Image: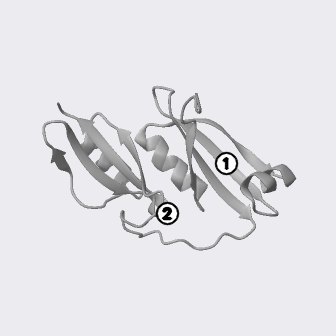
Amino acid sequence: MAIQRMDHVGIVVTDMAAATAFFVELGLTPVGSGEVEGAWVDRIIGVAGVRSEIAMLETPDGRSRLELSSFHTPPTPDGDPQAPANVPGLRHVCFAVDDVEDTVTRLKAHGGELVGSIERYGDVFRLCYVRGPEGIIVELAEEIG
């Protein structure tokens, strides 16, 4: 077999505290954090002089993880935190939730903004996109069928 599983998704942020608080409010649990630097990191990611803070968060079922990274050096180029969902590249991460409306309300206290509206996908899901800190788009899916 070529792969065993998807281990984690990485998201680069500038405000580690705000991003971590947002994802903790969503229901993820911090499972580790620290700083990484040195030639081995530079060689892995192909960027020289890296000094980065990382935080790993895990879903309640323990099967999925999210890695937040904040680069102290070298300076990072600016991105577009308001890029729409149809721009090429990694655009969103989806989480299954018990209650979409409650989750949106809780995330608003941590800078979350509803991108469009909460909609039904047939009799299967209630779905929405929430833009969190630094423009991160999170899809919320509440199973109803």
- Determine the CA span between mark 2 and mark 1: 16 Å
Where residue 122 appears, x then y in whole percent?
13, 41
Amino acid beneath label 1:
Ile
Tell me if 145 is positioned left or right of 53 in this view: left
Compared with 25, 133 (above or below) is below
Numbered circle sitting on residue 65:
none
Q: How is the image coloured?
A: one colour
* Residue located at (21% from left, 39% from top): 125
Read off the residue under disc 2: 134
Read off the residue under disc 1: 54
Where residue 2 appears, x then y in whole percent?
59, 32
Q: Nearer the viewer, residue 118 or 121?
A: 121
Q: Nearer the viewer, residue 109 or 33?
A: 33
Amino acid beneath label 2:
Glu
Instruction: For mark 1, give the secondary structure.
Output: strand
Compared with 13, 58 (above or below) is above
